[in-house]
Image (spheres, grey):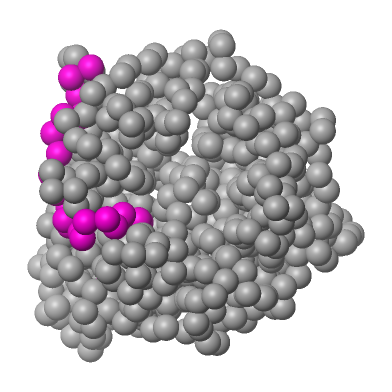
Amino acid sequence: MKHATLLALLLSCTSLVTQAQVFTDQIASSGLIPQQARALALYDHDNDGFTDVIWTANNWTQVQLMRNNGDLTFTDISASAGFEYLPNNDVLTLDLDNNGWGDIVQIDRENNTINLGMNTSGILESFTIDIPLDIHGTAGFMDHDRNGSIDLLISVLEEDNSRSIRVIYNDVCDANIADALQTSSLLAGPFAVGVDPIFSCMDYDNDLDADLLVVLQGTNGGSPGSGYHYQPINLFRNDAGEFTDATVNSGLGLGHASGATIWDFNNDGFMDLTFGTGDCCDNPNVTRTYQNNGDGTFADVSQSVVLKSGNHYYNVPNIADFDNDGDGDVYWQQGAWTNSQLFRNDGGTFSAETASAYGLNLSGGTDNNGAPGGGFPYWFDIDNDGDQDVLFGTQHNGAAKLMINPLLPSSGANAHSLSIDLEGCSSGKSAINAVVKVYRAGMVTAQMSSSTLQGSLLRSRYHFGMSSDAIADSVVVLWPSGSITRLYDVPSSQVLIQEDPACIFTNCLTTTVGASAEQSSSSAYPNPTSGLIRLTNIPQGITPQLFDATGRSLSVHARRQGQNAILDLSTYPAGLYFVRAGDRSFTIVRE
């Protein structure tokens, strides 16, 4: 299948003398109110390329939509944008109606309503929708029915007081939006009475659909009881929209009840899991990391991947390649009793705790007993200069911080980066749960748009450090629709990748402008294949290239028959392969 892309090159790295990488706090001049403050959502509200913030301050008495001006300052645009925060609502952002503008979703668990701020050209129109469910817990997103319109996943209370995970189907583009979001179906559960399913979406088995990872909060060893110790992990495999419990033989054991961070800690192209510690007194008191083996199973590597210092609460870790070396570093959102901690990643091997060396030994304020709290760190490139900064919110009494990364431009020659925005078509405009893989220098790094990557905030932009490499060998996007886009020789820059530039959204759903006759006649068959594959309409002079699922180039002989090319994959094992033939690309399944 041929996938066209649009590249918008917006910035490049500059080579200057390397300086000490100590972050500096610039919140005083930023326009953000710092006292008892933190971010509720990060997204680009006005489509100017800079990440804006929904910001709460003064112990929730002020909630503002703050526009990022691009110069380390923010402006309150709540009134002009029509933004209003509803008290005690959970806040999420997503382009629900596929019009290219990020909408605001506020979930009121007390009144079982979903409050929408539908964004058109930066102006919000508000709707309140009564939901025929007892909303109980966390929410997430997935295009469950694969119609290009992103659906809402939510934890609900069933009639027997058990909890379950349901999908509410997205039909907000129907004639009467006030009557939308009324249809739902059960995805997972019901779980035991008294426990809450904390869930994340991830494609753990690499079949291009989003599965569910669930930890039960409010249990003790799997039974109702103490809620914040290690809990059994539940894994549900998605097969064409039907979820099956795949926990047995998965290799997963226990995890912290606040949920997992999903990331590629060892740069093998597969999404791994890291959990914090449930309590200071759990035995053994270790953070838990599960390495994805790439075959649908995990290995517990917690003893070799040491990501803690002292007996403290370790909540959901934040992942940020703060030094642009291509490895995701770990910055802990601490619980009580200690400041935040940083562990630098060097090829899957982690340093001792080193936050102080970078000016990041931060406290989210002190509780009523005088103990420090770790706060709410959110990593993103605030000024679009190619490195990741951190907006650090308070957990107790104290002031938030806007910590600016000095890496660029001072270390440009050794700190290139690639920032990627996605625009979906069949996957929905927001392309939630897409996986992006960047190949360079014999390594591959994978990232996904999971809500657990930023302490409950959805990723709005993918950031890949590239060290001294100014060009990535290739970039692969695994879209939630099941399609795949592959780019080659991508320079370090800021890039927009479209699932299909010819895509047109009509009433939220997708139609596509037809390709030319020459392009539409290209095909690969039989697919799946047991060996031979025929590529049709391949121009003379074009030699097909074969790649495995990790992006490694493979040797293959192409036999020509006129405009067709015949490849023999019989010597290769079963699996997923990619063929590139000039401007055409194909995904091949070898049986």
Give residue 515's position: percent from left, percent from top.
24, 39
Taking the spot 68% from the left edge, 49% from the top edge, the residue there is: 367
Give whichever of 522, 587 is nearer the camera: 587
Decide: is 127 above or below 489: above
- Residues rendered magenta in the picture: 178-206
Decide: is 325 above or below 420: below
Taking the spot 36% from the left edge, 60% from the top edge, the residue there is: 217
Taking the spot 35% from the left edge, 70% from the top edge, the residue there is: 220
Find the residue positioned furthest to the front. Answer: 369
Find the residue positioned furthest to the top. Answer: 80
Asked if one can make out residue 432 in the rendered structure from this viewpoint, the answer is yes
Please identify the quarter of the rendering in which residue 590 is found.
bottom left
Decide: is 243 above or below 443: above
The quadrant of the rendering that contains the N terminus is bottom left
Give residue 555's position: percent from left, percent from top.
35, 82
Give residue 388's position: percent from left, percent from top.
67, 51
Give whichever of 315, 413 is nearer the camera: 315
| Left or right: 50 as drawn, with respect to 166 | right
The quadrant of the rendering that contains the C terminus is bottom left
Give residue 193's position: percent from left, percent from top.
21, 56
Please identify the quarter of the rendering in which residue 42 is found.
top right
Give whichever of 269, 20 is nearer the camera: 20
Asked if one can make out residue 202 in the rendered structure from this viewpoint, the answer is no
| Left or right: 377 as drawn, with respect to 268 | right
Instruction: Answer whether residue 507 is magenta in the image.
Output: no
Please identify the quarter of the rendering in which residue 571 is found.
bottom left
Give whichever of 515, 482 is nearer the camera: 482
